[in-house]
Amino acid sequence: MINLSARKLTSLNGKWNTIIDPNGVGDFHKFWEDRKPEKKTDFVEYSFENGDVLNVPSDFNTQMTELTYYEGIVWYKKTFKYDLKTNKRLFLHFGAVNYLTDVYFNGKLLGTHEGGFTPFQFEITNLISNSENSIVVKVNNKKVKEGIPSEGYDWFNYGGITRDVNLIETPQSFIEDYSIQLKKNSNNEVLGWVKIDGTTISQKIKLSIPELKLNVKVKTNDSGYAPIQFKAKFNLWSPGNPKLYRIEIQSGLDTISDEIGFRNIETNGTKIVLNGKPVFLKAINIHEEMPTRVAKAYSEKDAEVLLNWAKELGCNMVRLAHYPHNEYMVKLAEKKGLMIWEELPVYQHIEFSNEKVQQKMDLMLKEMIKRDKNRSAIIIWSLSNETYHFTKSRDEALIKLVKQCKILDSTRLTTTVISTQGYTNNTFDLSDPLYNYFDIISVNEYIGWYTPWQGLPKDTKWKFVNDTKPVIISEFGGEAFYGSTKQPKDEASGWSEEYQEQIYKDQIEMFDTNPNLAGVCPWILCDFRSQSRLHPIYQRGWNRKGLLSDKGEKKKAWYVMKEFYKSKN
């Protein structure tokens, strides 16, 4: 279900008992039974008690030195007591667990979930005991060839129960889901719906917006679904006016409230248009990592730090790379007036020809959209990053996926990011036909770093597969080790701040040559951990393309980008 903060929650965050299982023996020993010796002759070769204890939510890699680079199985256990009243239901909800998860409750398998960045839940109403209850979670963050992402990706593989765990108590019949957003191309008409769970009888639904003195009444059908349509004079959400309205939805047994903004996002030729006015996207890429703590970001406090840096840079949008970030990031960005680009972890070496992989893509898309569809700050659904045109079935799979995305949510823009564009004779060739199926052409290019300039930046030329669509430079930049200023300023191998600074100056000069440019998004806000970055002096397990160092220190390129964004006001 969505909008957890408005429901009756009992947090299960805190200390969990764990067993580290590098050889995968837990299934053989049935760790989920949590057996104890009862007779003198009993012999049990495992125990959650008196073993390692880990914090939840958090990654396990940064809590124990021996787990720093661990990829494998960790078993978690939590016990609790809960007095569930008659005519109430109870659900066990996980914000995210990376990557493959089996969940057991009082010794019984509730189910499994694959994917490290989207929420899932199980109902435990009929399994709860008045005495002590036990949850055992098997987590495996080992990379999977048929996974999403697949085996090769350029960020740290933080494993474990990385987001909040909650018990959710509801009435027998409750408001499971709803969509309250403006109709496509409208600034005043809402086209939405409400879905009730737990009833086959029609119910009256009342939706109200107290500030607007608006009340809408509808009835559900026998499936618990009720369409909602109404008009109002909204104070529209925008970066300069991040207005949110308190929305109340009431059913027969349940009431839920939310804070929702209303805005209209569309394209008009090569322009991206917000509430009827062209907007230039001044963005920054962000990974879900707190570099100053060298750990997975998971809390509202973490989100505050990262988003405040983005605001200080002068951004009006954040690209949450390369997967759905935690809900704190999304909700806080909306309150701060930051538009959001949200993305699936369909990254590089995906096996698009594998039918099971396609099914996983489809499920992750549904999970992402379900959680965040009411967040007006989200203007772009990105369905993949840096996929290859020569990968078998790539085009067919992503075309199918974007069509499904438009069915699930037609109110936002779509994109897919490609980095295999041609660059010869100082000309970018953005001719990948896959772009034709998406609203925005997004390109990652690292001219000046991985690829040298072939001419003057101001003389760059562009060739488009479709010259009627807006273009976003979704990644650009280069690596610099903070404080490395005594190295050659004109050699990439010096990893100097000055070399990175010059890349940014050249890129900004090149931006003016692109007639379709609607936004730019440097890679990346902060240096971040990556096990594939192995230079013994300058990297040491870090990707150093951040405008900020791993300690939050501003590199010279930060100021270049800040001035550019200031000039785009």
Image: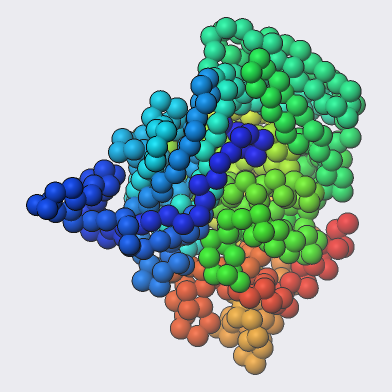
Q: Residue at x 40, y 73 (%)?
A: 65
- In the figure, is residue 203 to the left or right of 188? left
What count of labels does the image hold? 0
Vertical placement of residue 441 versus 153, above or below: above
Asked if residue 260 can be seen in this view, the reply is yes
Query: Considering depth in this image, is 508 or 545 the residue closer to the camera?
Result: 545
Relative image position of residue 301 (x, y in whole percent):
67, 59
**Horizontal and vertical percent position of residue 122:** 44, 33
- Figure quadrant of the C terminus: bottom right
Q: How is the image coloured?
A: rainbow
Work out whether 43 lies above or below 377: below
Question: Residue at (37%, 50%) from the top-left corner?
Answer: 77
Residue at the spot 21% in from the left edge and 53% down from the top edge: 25
- What percent of the width, then of the height, locates residue 365? 53, 36
Q: Is residue 394 visible?
A: no
Q: Give the quarter of the image for residue 169.
A: top right
Q: Quadrant of the N terminus?
A: top right
* In this view, 62 is above or below 521: below
Taking depth in this image into account, of 406 and 246 the one nearest to the observer is: 246
Q: Is residue 148 left or right of residue 554?
A: left
Q: From what the image shows, is residue 450 above or below residue 203?
A: below
**Residue sitting at x 40%, y 25%:** 126
Which residue ends up furthest to the left in the rendered image? 41
Nearest the viewer among 377 and 250 is: 250
Q: Picture coordinates of residue 113 (x, y %)?
A: 40, 40
Picture quadrant of residue 229? top right
